[in-house]
Amino acid sequence: MSTPPLLHIENLKLYFRTGKGMVRAVDDVHFDLEANHAVVVLGESGCGKTSLAKAILRLLPRNVDTYSGEVYLNGVDVMAFNDEEYRRQVRWRKMSMVPQAAMNALNPVLKVGDQVAEPSIIHSAMRKEEALEQASKMFQHVGVPQDFLHRYAFELSGGMRQRVAIAMALVTWPDLIVLDEPTSALDVLTQANIFNVLKELKGELGLSFILITHDIATSSELADSVAVMYAGQIVETGDAHRFFAEPLHPYSRKLMDSVPRLRGTQEPDFIVGQPPSLINPPTGCRFAARCPQCFSRCVEDPPTIAENGRTVKCWLHVA
Amino acid sequence: MNTITETAQAEGAVVASARGNGDNVLLSVQDLRVWFELRRFGFGHAGYVRAVDGVNFDLHYSETIAIVGESGCGKSSLMKTILALHRPTKGDIFFEGQSLNALRGSEMQKYRSQVGYVQQDPYGALAPFMSIQKILEEPQIINGIKNKAERDDRLRRAMEEVKMSPVDDFLPKFPHMLSGGQQQRVVIARAMLLDPKLIVADEPVSMLDASVRVEILKLLRGLQEAHDLAVIYITHDLSTVRYFSERVFVMYAGKIVENSPINDLIRNPCHPYTDALLAATSDPDANNATRFRDVPPGEPPSLVKPPAGCRFHPRCARRIEGLCEVEEPPYFEPELNHFAACWLYR
């Protein structure tokens, strides 16, 4: 490979200590993201997808037990950085995040313009006027009228607040933005609007996205590739066209079948049972207990098979 | 209260005559208006929020309907008025021919026992300090089922109907010990306890995981069929409506703009707003990533001063100048049994 991928993750682990035992929220995750691509991380709640985002951005809570693995950003090993270096050189500068429900977390007593300007002051050492200018530029990109710079969060609708949250992540010109459920609390038309904005940003600014969601239908609005997560592990990756046409892992197939569709006549189905606890995940394949195609080999941990640019962690695909 | 009623009366276009108990009609909503008064500094009058403004429909026995609309369109106010949690400003709701406005005290309690309510957020709807046993017992005590054995029997049957078995494992648990899907089952069991004739489900699956949504919708559908229930399903997600209800009402800014059987609506949306909703709803398809979706500009209007004429006209690409912004469209019937409040079909 001549140019390294924008983001390369290998063996990433994030375990938490809790009163009940160790929670293996992110357990040996691998994936690559090319520049100007969007990868969607799909999974049910509690499968570790938000923890994965936090592990990538190193936004860790205090009860971390294990945090290890390799994260290469543009070929640079960022895991070698200490926290202070990471904060100065990576977070916001290279990658930023729009956390879940960020639109409800805007500071109610600050004007949204000042809030959007703040990261430039702190991370890019700009003066206030320059930073405000940047903020107004970002408002243009995300489609928020300029006079909203001087408004407070409560004066904005949900869709506008979500755009402000995205502007805030953009303002330091990062290469990669991690979006955690960016539209789950929004109405259908507003959702479509936000995705239009994200598509525009991807085209105009050459941004890359990691989109974390459980909503398969809307995830296809942005996805170039898909990574399916189950019980702390990535069970399938592949490009979006082939994934949406024919998912490989039994879990991905079930997940696709559970989507109610507006067009077409296919009756949706659901997945019986619940995902396992991440405190004592089952040995072998973690999906085996709910899998309709489970067989004798599933008691052992399946290897990750790579074929034609897709990967799948399932014994069914072992030749 | 009196002045509000008078204002509403003066502005009401149609004064519906009380139709009483028609054939097979369980619930009849007639020219319903629910307005909330805005006050300045706590006392001066500052206008009304017209959350529901002139809604008419009939719901038959064992019929399922869906009310679809964005947040702020008045669907929750409509629902709460049907549950008799708000009083109508004007208009009335008839349940089996009985006016809800006239119900008092014990009659109201009897009405409420016949209407089950499935809330949007199951965790918020279950008291965190009560066990499932208690949660399912309390409504029965309030509604005068004195025999402990009968209460026990009913709650067990309800739990089995929502497939929470073995029942004994779940009864002593508290809501936080259950998963989101299980909590929603308990909420449904509670709504079913008193053998209601009508279930009002307010976005019952929007807080749940994608893989659980279909399961809960199928469960509700099964209960509806087994007990011949009438169901009002309130949602903003058109893709789930298909699997659930026969008829759909699209609501925009306090009014119903389109009303049709669901398959006709998807095949041939008549109102431009419905068209926009359908166009914005995605199915999983990798080609979505390369196309931009058409979204009408702007945002839903304020319900304090809604636009004159058709309320969608400021955002509508197909508006007819000189008509849509002047006169409010009546219902036209572009195809059989499919109604749209839009001047395009005059």
Image: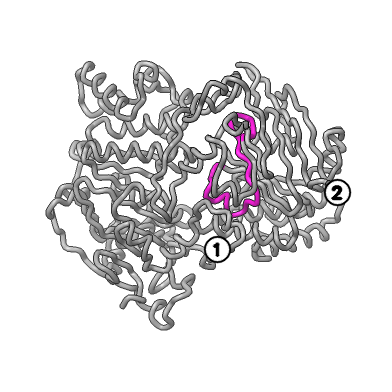
Residue at left 16%, top 47%? B96
Residue type of the residue flagged with mark 2: Ser
Residue A217: in magenta span: yes
**Residue sticking out furthest to the front:** A319
Q: Residues within 10 Å of mark 2 (few under 14, many from 20)?
A: few
Name the chain under label 2: A
The answer to whether B341 is drawn above or below residue B112 in the figure is: below
Residue B120: image x %, image y %? 42, 41
In depth, the one of A305 and B340 nearer the eye is A305
Question: In the image, are marks 1 and 2 on the same chain?
Answer: no
Instruction: Tell me the quarter of the picture where residue B186 sits.
Output: top left
One can see residue A274 in this view = yes
The answer to whether B44 is drawn above or below residue A81 in the figure is: below
Q: Which mark identifies residue B293?
A: 1
Q: Closer to the observer: label 1 or label 2?
A: 2
In depth, the one of B234 and B215 nearer the eye is B215
Which residues are the magenta region?
Answer: A214-235
Q: Which residue is mark 2?
A: A2
The answer to whether B110 is drawn above or below residue B293 in the figure is: above
Task: Describe the element under mark 1 as helix, strand or loop.
Answer: loop
